[in-house]
Image: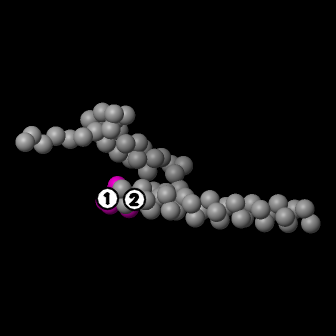
């Protein structure tokens, strides 16, 4: 049986190269924070699905923290 790559209908064969070029551009941009550079650099050597799962968890945790911090600022401003 012939082995073939299964690509998303939204991506062509060059999608990985395009994504990696975008990551490199962000990492090399002078306005990019060191934290984001480090995170992207660390992600490149890992399984992409694991990275996305971790990014989803990080986003959820930081969204909750940000919402709580904004609520606290609003409550403090009302006093």
Residue 75, x across and y down, in percent: 84, 64
Which residue is rendered at x = 35% and y = 45% of the image? Answer: 20
Nearer to the camera, 45 or 2: 2
Nearer to the camera, 6 or 43: 6
**Compared with residue 19, is residue 44 higher up or lower down, i.e. above or below?**
below
Q: Which residues are magenta?
A: 42-48
Direction right: furthest residue = 79
State left or right for residue 22 relative to residue 58. left
How many residues crowd mark 1 within 10 Å: few (<14), some (14–19), many (20+)? few
Residue labelled with disc 2:
51
Q: Quadrant of the N terminus?
A: top left
Distance (Cα) linking label 2 and label 1:
6 Å
Residue 29, x across and y down, in percent: 48, 46
Nearer to the camera, 18 or 63: 63
Q: Secondary structure at mark 1?
A: loop
Residue 43 at least partly seen: no
The number of discs equals: 2
Which residue is rendered at x = 87% and y = 62% of the image? Answer: 77
Residue labelled with disc 1:
47
């Amino acid at each position: 049986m012939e082995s073939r790559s299964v690509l998303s209908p939204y991506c062509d064969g060059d999608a990985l190269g395009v994504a990696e070029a975008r990551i490199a551009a962000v990492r090399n941009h002078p306005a990019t924070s060191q934290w984001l550079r480090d995170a992207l650099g660390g992600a490149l050597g890992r399984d992409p699905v694991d990275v996305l799962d971790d990014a989803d968890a990080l986003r959820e945790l930081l969204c909750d923290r940000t919402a709580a911090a904004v609520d606290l600022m609003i409550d403090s401003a009302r006093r």
